[in-house]
Image: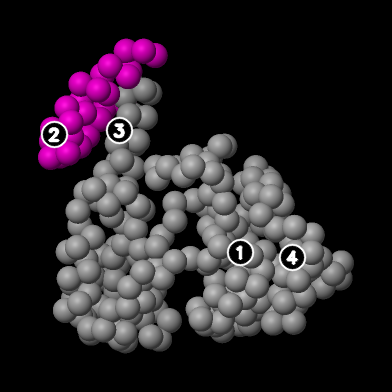
Amino acid sequence: FFNLGELQETKLESLKQTLKFPLRTYLKENGFLGLVGYQTKKNKLVLASKKNIQGVFKLMFENIWNDAVNPKKEEEIKEWIRNENVSLTFEVIDAEYDPHIIEYEKSKIVLLDAVYREEEFRKVPYEKLKKIANKMNLEIKKETNIIQNFEELNEFLEEQSRYDNKIEGYVIEDSSGYQFKIKLPYYSYWKWARTEINKMKSGKKTNEEFFEHPISKKYNVKKAFVEIIEKY
């Protein structure tokens, strides 16, 4: 699914015509995607990340999974996945080896969804998934708001436009299952800052619009960037 305004279908004027209310909003954690499936032939769980069952991100996911899920719970999860014919999706936060823009005190995994292994997309309802997560001692994505109409959606978006809200954003899902996401100003600004400082470090020309941004001017970011680069 895509960001608000990224495609024509996710622009507000289009959403006004297509969204099915009420909407539910979920906190968007700042990590990478982890997948857990069931392998029938070997009767075991298979962990993957970014569609790969090997590689460094899969290993990071596996290490955090092993810390979070004991063997008994893993067996229960395996049985449930097999019986329900689903795969699980997680947000994986590795605070030590893969820090992102949003800071976390410790590494963790957050259950996002349980998706049925069928040709047509379908997933386990959130209320049922919460009960399963509680039983399996898994942290689940946090539902934050229920939005009843388009006016309330505009109010929510306005409220989230403050710079001091230090989270990545939200995933918004309508009553038909359609999803889009919003990225908040704090996250978006510092993601942009990371891009610009990497340009400076590699000797490439930076985007002057970044340094004209009100936040950049307020904190004299250009001077700070130059001081950082002089250390290299």
Residue 218 bears which disc, if any? 2
Within 10 angstroms of label 1, few (less than 14), some, or many (20 or more) residues? some
Front-lying residue, 113 or 5: 113
Pair 3/2: label in front: 2
Q: Which residue is mark 1?
A: 138
Q: Quadrant of the N terminus?
A: bottom left
Residue 142 in the image: x percent, y percent?
A: 44, 66
Please indicate whether residue 119 sits to the left or right of residue 153 in the image: right
At label 3, counting other C-alpha atoms closer than 10 Å, the crowd grade (few under 14, some 14-19, many 20 or more) is: many
Could you tell me which secondary element the residue under label 3 belongs to? Answer: helix
Magenta residues (range): 204-232
Instruction: Please indicate whether residue 35 sits to the left or right of residue 171 in the image.
Output: right
Q: Which residue is mark 4?
A: 73
Q: Is residue 86 magenta?
A: no
Q: Identify which residue is drawn at 22% across, 69% down.
A: 156
Q: Are marks 2 and 4 in contact (CB under 8 Å)?
A: no
Mark 2 or 4: in front is 4
- Alpha carbon distance from label 1 to label 2: 41 Å
